[in-house]
Image (cartoon, rainbow, N blue to C red):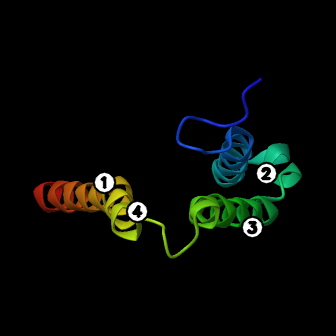
Amino acid sequence: MEEKNDDGRIRSLDGLRGVAALAVVAYHYTGGYLHRLLPGGRFVALFFILSGLVLSIAPLRVGAGAYDWPRYQLRRVVRLAIPTCTAVGLCCAVFSIFS
């Protein structure tokens, strides 16, 4: 089985990060026994550790000096800041309309 995607990402790390994220969501949004069984704080720590590892792999492979940092920053802004700002704007609009 192929372990890496075309962009050099390691699928197993992405999958483990996804499992940790789902466990955190399940911890926050479920009650009863499931809430008591899931170690939510540990999954948060695992998610952040894996995220730091995943984000550092590409620059380490090519060397920090040769890595295309402007492209990296642009991709992060497009992927994170634009959806976040859009969601906040929609929430503000809905709040101002219905309050």
Discs 1, 4 touching: Cβ within 8 Å:
no
Name the mark on residue 45.
Answer: 3
Quadrant location of the N terminus?
Answer: top right
Label located before the other in sequence (4 or 2): 2
Mark closer to the chain start, 4 or 3: 3
Q: Mark 1 or mark 4, which is nearer to you? A: 4
In the image: residue 35, left or right of residue 77:
right
Identify the mark nearer the N-term, 1 or 3: 3
User: To which residue does mark 4 refer?
Assistant: 72
Residue 67 place in picture, x, y as percent = 48, 66
Q: What amino acid type is highlighted by mark number 2?
A: His
Disc 2 marks which residue? 35
Q: Residues within 10 Å of mark 4 (few under 14, many from 20)?
A: few
Q: Secondary structure at mark 1?
A: helix
Amino acid marked by disc 3: Ala
Give me the C-alpha separation between circle 1 and circle 3: 24 Å
Disc 4 from disc 2: Cα separation? 37 Å
Disc 1 marks which residue? 83
What residue is drawn where x is 57% and y is 65%?
Answer: 59
The one nearer the camera, 37 or 32, is 37
Residue that sits furthest to the bottom in the current view: 65
